[in-house]
Image (cartoon, helix red, strand yellow):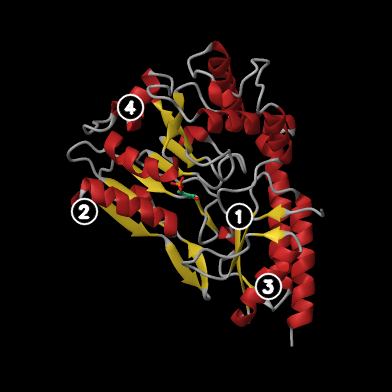
Amino acid sequence: MSAIYNFCAGPAMLPQAVMKKAQQELLDWNGLGVSVMEVSHRGKEFIALAEQSEADLRELMNIPDNYHVLFMHGGGRGQFSAIVNNFLGDNGRALYLLSGQWSSSAFTEAQKLAGEAQIDSLNIVEKHNGLNAVVIPDLHKFDADYRYVHYCPNETVDGIEIFDELDSPWPVIADLSSTIMSREIDVSRYGLIYAGAQKNIGPSGLSIVIVRDDMLKLPTLTQSSIMDYRVAVEFDSMFNTPPTFAWYLAAEVFAWLKSIGGVASIAEINKQKAQMLYACIDANPFYKNGVVAANRSKMNVTFQLSDESLDGEFLKQAQAAGLLALKGHRIVGGMRASLYNAMPLEGVVALVSFMNDFAAKHSK
Ligand SMILES: *Cc1c(COP(=O)(O)O)cnc(C)c1O
């Protein structure tokens, strides 16, 4: 079988080396004669895994000591609710910056839980010469007292990424679901970072939360204990049974990333991958991308064929060539190639070669 490259936006491909190791030790983990799925999360072997994974993530992201690292249930959307319940109390207000589908979904959930009076929003995407561009006003000039400002540095559906860290007078909460560990960030600039695991970390269901200690002093609402950050901190993310198999795979992904040189190394490869694909799109009038260069996502490259009627044929031939899941999100249409950490450079080389051939055959 020739190589298969999976460009799915999520759940996304995982590193081959991790999948092989998981397969090897599926029935006999750590010499215990049973799977990691079948042991107590309170046993010393799993506790060791949990501690190592946290230490590895702290090292990979350079997380300061005054931050807690939590392994929680409920994916990215679980955190849309948790942040409201944990930080807004009865009358706290928050600002949501809107740059695409996911930041809008987070905003809608916050309004549903806290009510419209407590949740403000600000659209930060403008059209520049027909292309989407992110423009963030000076937040220091706002006459408002927010408990936090929420934004989504990488819009997975729209292919829009914000590379500069936010300059904000209020604590910043960032949904890093589709860009965590893809490039270096300064964690100390955030009040809370969260990420559903299924893009750059591991299987779906798990979410990672990195929260600054002082955020936990904000007034909370009465809420379910499993979404309460204070409870998660107190019980080391084990108030109830954590998603242990997902946690195990996340731990293996962290170890893999460390073994290949960490976030700085993968960021360099990610840059090359994205450059190569955008160069192909820009060189062929047959393809187009609707985002200004400064906000083009390195993780989720969206593009359209100039002749939409060829979409079906493009996807069919791509699949036959081993290039999977290139169909764009149903809301925006077109194509999307997700180039998360696990996607090797060769995958993008294969995709670009296919796209050049396809364009040559179908250009008039
Ligand atoms: C995938 C994704 C989510 C949703 O994650 P779920 O685990 O499905 O809830 C939220 N935000 C962003 C930016 C995403 O890419």
Q: Looking at the rendering, which quadrant does residue 341 occupy?
A: top right
Residue 144 lies, with reference to residue 24, above or below; the image says below
- The residue that label 4 is drawn on is 216
Please identify, in this view, whether the residue under mark 3 or under mark 4 is nearer the observer: 3
Q: Residue at x 78, y 71 (%)?
A: 356
Indicate left or right for 173 with 154 as reference. left
Indicate yes or no: mark 2 CB to ligand 1 under 8 Å. no
- The kind of residue tagged 4 is Leu
Q: Amino acid at mark 3?
A: Phe
| Residue furthest to the top | 44
Q: Which residue is mark 2?
A: 116
Amino acid identity at mark 1: Cys
Pointer 1 residue: 8
- Tell me how far mark 2 sits from mark 4, CA to CA: 24 Å
- The mark nearer the N terminus, 2 or 3, is 2
| 10 Å crowding of disc 3: few (<14), some (14-19), many (20+) | many
Check disc 2: other Cα within 10 Å, few if <14, some if 14-19, many if 20+.
Answer: some
Tell me the tag on residue 314.
3
Q: Is residue 118 left or right of residue 13?
A: left
Left of 359 or right of it: where is 66?
Answer: left
Looking at the rendered image, the disc whose residue lies closer to the viewer, 1 or 2, is 1
Amino acid on which the number 2 mark rests in the picture: Glu
Regarding mark 4 in the picture, which secondary structure is present there? helix
- Residue 83 is situated, as x and y percent measured from the top left of the image, at 33, 39
Q: Is mark 4 within 8 Å of ligand 1?
A: no
Pointer 1 local density, CA inside 10 Å: few below 14, some 14–19, many at least 20: many
